[in-house]
Amino acid sequence: MWVTITENDILTRLAAPEVNALKTAATAQGQENPLPEILAAVVREVRGYVAAFPGNKLGPDGTIPDELQVAALNRARYELATRLPVASLLTDARKESNADAIARLRDVAKGTLRIVQPPHPKPAEQATPKLRGYWGSAKPIK
């Protein structure tokens, strides 16, 4: 199954006070919450790793395979935490989780970790092809 990562999903990897601090700290005047931008970047990164293996197909835009959801959230947590000059957010366990996430993504790119492929899209209705040649000519017949 292919899933969309949301801001609420990041709460499974960070405590609510941490999320609030990361959303508002280290932002310039007029700068908005960086979380949506970081999540979008991580989703693009994951999709890039998936697309790197020729046997993989991509699901709908903005989605990732659910097998990579935890890896994506760990990457997002790491990227959020590196925005701030607070070393306590980047614990050894979080650094290791980020390294594990990257290793998992690399395995997908190499094809050593297989993911469930997205469902095949329904065949589009075929339009009636325009006739060519004598019968399809726009010129009147004389």
Image (cartoon, grey):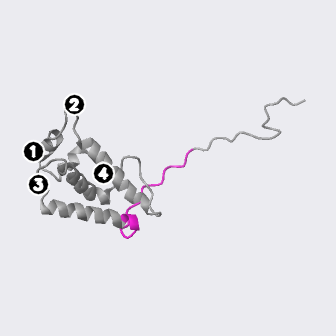
Locate residue 14, reporting x and y percent: 15, 51
Q: Which residues are magenta?
A: 108-124
Q: Residues within 10 Å of mark 2 (few under 14, many from 20)?
A: few
In this picture, is 22 found above or below 78? above
Cα–Cα gap, marks 2 and 3? 26 Å
Residue holding disc 3: 87
Q: Quadrant of the N terminus?
A: bottom left
Cα–Cα gap, marks 1 and 2? 22 Å
Residue holding disc 1: 17
Amino acid at the residue labelled 4? Val
Q: Quadrant of the C terminus?
A: top right
In this picture, is 17 found above or below 110? above
Q: Give the overall secondary structure of the magenta segment.
A: loop
Cα–Cα gap, marks 3 and 4? 22 Å
Amino acid at the residue labelled 3? Ala
Q: Residues within 10 Å of mark 1 (few under 14, many from 20)?
A: few
Is residue 1 visible in the rendered image? The answer is no
Give the residue drawn at x 78%, y 31%. Answer: 138
Residue holding disc 2: 30
Q: Do the residues bearing badges 2 and 3 touch, measured as CB atoms within 8 Å?
A: no
90 or 71, which lies in front?
A: 90
Residue holding disc 4: 42
Q: Residues within 10 Å of mark 4 (few under 14, many from 20)?
A: many
Locate residue 98, reporting x and y percent: 22, 60
